[in-house]
Amino acid sequence: MLLITGLKRALRKAKKPLNPILGEVFYSHFTPAFGDADAVDEGESVPMAASVSGADGLPTVYLVGEQISHHPPISAFHATCPDRGIDITIVYDVKAKYNGLSFALENKSLGTVRIADHNETYTLTYPSANIVGIVTMNMRLMWTGTCTIECAETNLKGTLNFKEQRWFGRDTYDVTGTVTALNNPKKVHATLSGAWNDTIHVQRAGVDAKPTPMFSVRDRSVYAPSVVPGDRAPPHASRRVWADVVAAMRAGDASGAAKAKHDVEHRQRAKEKERVAGTRAPFQAVYFVGDPLVPDSVRFTAGGVRLPGVGEDCRGHPAAVAAARGIGVVSAAEDEEESGPEVVAGDDDEDSESGESFEDANE
């Protein structure tokens, strides 16, 4: 139920993000956090579909993301949990359209989950969404449409249908679904029903019993993200790219933030002109290969970045292996151009950032 767990984050208010620049990277690792739901929300913790049972031997999830296309904007992410032998790659491709009362988000994202111990690979599509409440200035992200989960090894296909949100009326979180044979859609193994922000129930085919709770989003273990500090991150890491913008926003300097944002975008436009003119090499992603416009062709290539506090790259391999590959985050030329100040420390930094050193594989 990884898909449903992630969708629950839509309960928070919609926010306008900083649009990633081409080649921007983000690193994080997630460790179990404990506490009530309110404390979790304040700390920006991330719900994950992994269960934990104690303070010792808890699994850690490592994540790396990269903006692999600017026109259209497409991001790719890879997360791995070495202790569980699980790898996830997601190509994130969402397009927005305004219809006067809401924003419709067409979601063409594609996810692949690999479970090594069972030799199983799951392919996930994602539902679309609507940002509602624009007229009342109480904006929420509501999922709609259909998504699927397929596994050739088990010959199973799951389909989830999200109820359409009406323009007026109370919010709707209803979801229904089926689990069928992949090669025979008429062979139904189970039906699903419930609310995507709460509990999903399952009714197994041929079993004369009431639906039973299968999964509760609210009961999932909670993972708190640790983010690489800006002064220890490579030049294209998010905290370096947007350091001046974030510092100005925290200081309440709206005009300064706008100018800093314009400066970042201006540098990117200048680089793109150089690529078009042939004076700069074409962009090549560091961590992913494949055509961003063909999501199922995109593959994670490891890259070789040592994460904070662990002697492993983001695939769980020894850091020495990554260093031997000689793969860096950006070229030496761009490293020199993009060096910038670290992000001004805030309250969240003290709780989320690791005190360990971040090392680029080339250093």
Image (spheres, rainbow, N blue to C red):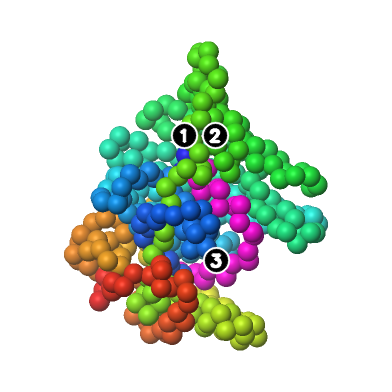
Our reading of the magenta stretch's main secondary structure is loop
User: Is residue 86 visible to us here?
Assistant: no
Let me know if residue 8 is in the magenta part.
yes
Q: Nearer the viewer, mark 1 or mark 2?
A: 2
Label 3: few (<14), some (14–19) or many (≥20) C-alpha neighbours in 10 Å: some
Label 1: few (<14), some (14–19) or many (≥20) C-alpha neighbours in 10 Å: many
**Three-letter code for the amino acid on which mark 2 is drawn:** Ile
Residue 227: x and y in percent read 40, 67
Do the residues bearing badges 1 and 3 touch, measured as CB atoms within 8 Å?
A: no
Disc 1 is placed on an element classified as: strand
Left or right: 174, with 355 as reference point: right
**Three-letter code for the amino acid on which mark 1 is drawn:** Glu
Q: Is residue 9 above or below residue 173?
A: below
Give me the residue at 49% from left, 36% from top: 215
Mark sitting earlier along the chain (3/2): 3
Query: What residue is disc 1 on?
Result: 150
Give me the residue at 54% from left, 23% from top: 211
Left or right: 287, with 94 as reference point: left
Query: What residue is disc 3 on?
Result: 70
The answer to which quarter of the image holds residue 100 is bottom right
Most foreground residue, 320 or 176: 176
Q: Which residues are magenta?
A: 4-23
Query: What residue is disc 2 on?
Result: 200
**Three-letter code for the amino acid on which mark 3 is drawn:** His
Q: Nearer the viewer, mark 1 or mark 3?
A: 1
Residue 181: x and y in percent read 47, 23
